Amino acid sequence: MPLSLRIPPGKEKLLRKAAAKAGKTKTAFILDALDEKLGLGKNREKEVRSLGGWMSHEEARELRDSVNVFNK
């Protein structure tokens, strides 16, 4: 279903840059943001936190360090 969204020029510029950095179209970037905001998809940090609840602090730190490469 088509949807028109008016975005101020400054925000559109930020959106364009963020989408390009993520390797996505602006539409895909916005849809991912909506999914995250609506709780329809877990982001990487939430997923790691939910899986890491049974870990010791040391194990959680090691996991954080190991997956940090994905934030680049």
Image: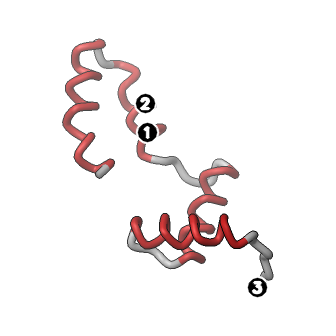
Gap between marks 2 and 3, in whole Å? 34 Å
| Gap between marks 1 and 2 measured at Cα | 6 Å
Where on the picture, by quarter, is residue 22?
bottom left
Q: Quadrant of residue 3?
A: bottom right
Q: Residue 1, which numbered label? A: 3
Q: Which mark is residue 11?
A: none
Which residue lies under the disc numbered 1?
A: 45
Name the element at disc 3: loop
Task: Please name the amino acid that badge 2 sits on.
Answer: Arg
Q: Residue at x 38, y 32 (%)?
A: 51
Of 43 and 27, the residue lying toward us: 27
Q: Amino acid at mark 3?
A: Met
Say what amino acid the circle numbered 1 marks.
Answer: Glu
Image quarter of residue 21 = bottom left
Look at 64% across and 48% down and name the residue there: 39
Distance from label 3 to label 1 (Cα)? 31 Å
Mark 3 is surrounded, within 10 Å at the Cα level, by few (under 14), some (14 to 19) or many (20 or more) other residues, namely few
Residue at the bottom extreme, as displayed: 2
Q: Position of residue 1 (x, y in %)?
A: 76, 85
Mark 2 surroundings within 10 Å by alpha-carbon count, few (fewer than 14), some (14 through 19), many (20 or more): few
The numbered mark, 2 or 3, whose residue comes first in the sequence reads 3
Sequence-wise, which precedes: disc 3 or disc 1? 3
Q: Give me the residue at 50% from left, 78% from top.
A: 25
Q: Position of residue 54 (x, y in %)?
A: 35, 19
Residue at the outermost front position:
10
- Which x, y percent locates residue 43? 48, 48
Residue matched to label 2: 49
